[in-house]
Image (cartoon, grey):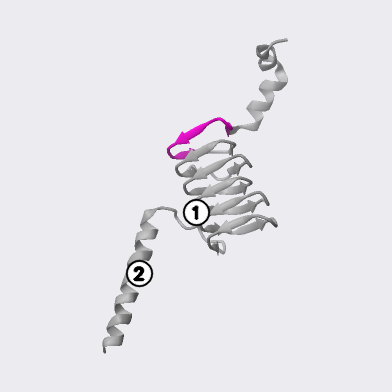
Amino acid sequence: MGIFDKIQSGTAAAVSITDKSTTIGENCTIDGDITFDKTIEIYGKISGTVKIAENCTKAMLVVKQSGVVEGDVFGDDVVIEGEIVGNVSSKNKITIKNSAFVSGNVYYDILDMHGGATVNGNLIRNKGKEPQKIGNDSKDSAVKLDIQSADSKSKEKLL
């Protein structure tokens, strides 16, 4: 019985058709942005933004224990077991397992964080609102606001 016999069997085909998930393998490295629909499981490494498709209403992003994402992550339901270096944003729920490492802000509506997980960043609740859009525009505006407030403080001191 060879590998092709297993692929042609009815049970193997049925599992892949009904599951409708995408898997990024442990030996796979992707440089670039990914847009997903349904479920994506990341065992490998992605350097770029990973986000849910615009018209998708329900999708799950799972970063497995061996998975690494270097970039911002945006999904409906997000489960983190591995490493994310970037901001994480969710429309619904974020689960951060005890093996997880996140270096960035976490924007959530529902947060399930297990003991032992590491988050180096802020935890920011969406309160039912649309999650913060991830991108350089928000960072630039935050910097501009800080500069303006610093300028106004220095002017007040002079007066």
Residue 48 coordinates in the image, percent (x, y): 45, 42
Residue 132 coordinates in the image, percent (x, y): 47, 58
**Mark 2: which amino acid?**
Leu
Residue under pointer 2: 145
**Mark 1: which amino acid?**
Asn
> Dot 2, crowdedness within 10 Å: few (<14), some or many (≥20)?
few
Asked which secondary structure carries label 1, the reply is loop
Identify the residue at horizontal 44%, vertical 40% (top origin): 33
Residue under pointer 1: 87
- Taking the magenta stretch, the answer to whether it contains residue 87 is no
Residue 66 coordinates in the image, percent (x, y): 61, 39
Q: Residue furthest top?
A: 1
Quarter of the view holding residue 39 = top right
Residue 158 vs 57, above or below: the answer is: below
Q: Are marks 1 and 2 in contact (CB under 8 Å)?
A: no
Identify the residue at horizontal 67%, vertical 50% (top origin): 97
Q: Quadrant of the N terminus?
A: top right
Taking depth in this image into account, of 37 and 83 the one nearest to the observer is 83
Instruction: Report the number of discs.
Output: 2
Identify the residue at horizontal 68%, vertical 24% (top origin): 14
In the rendered structure, which segment of residues is drawn in magenta? 23-35
Whether residue 92 sits left or right of residue 55 in the image: it is right
Q: Which mark is residue 98?
A: none
Residue 91 vs 127, above or below: the answer is: above
> Is residue 125 something one can see in this rendering?
no
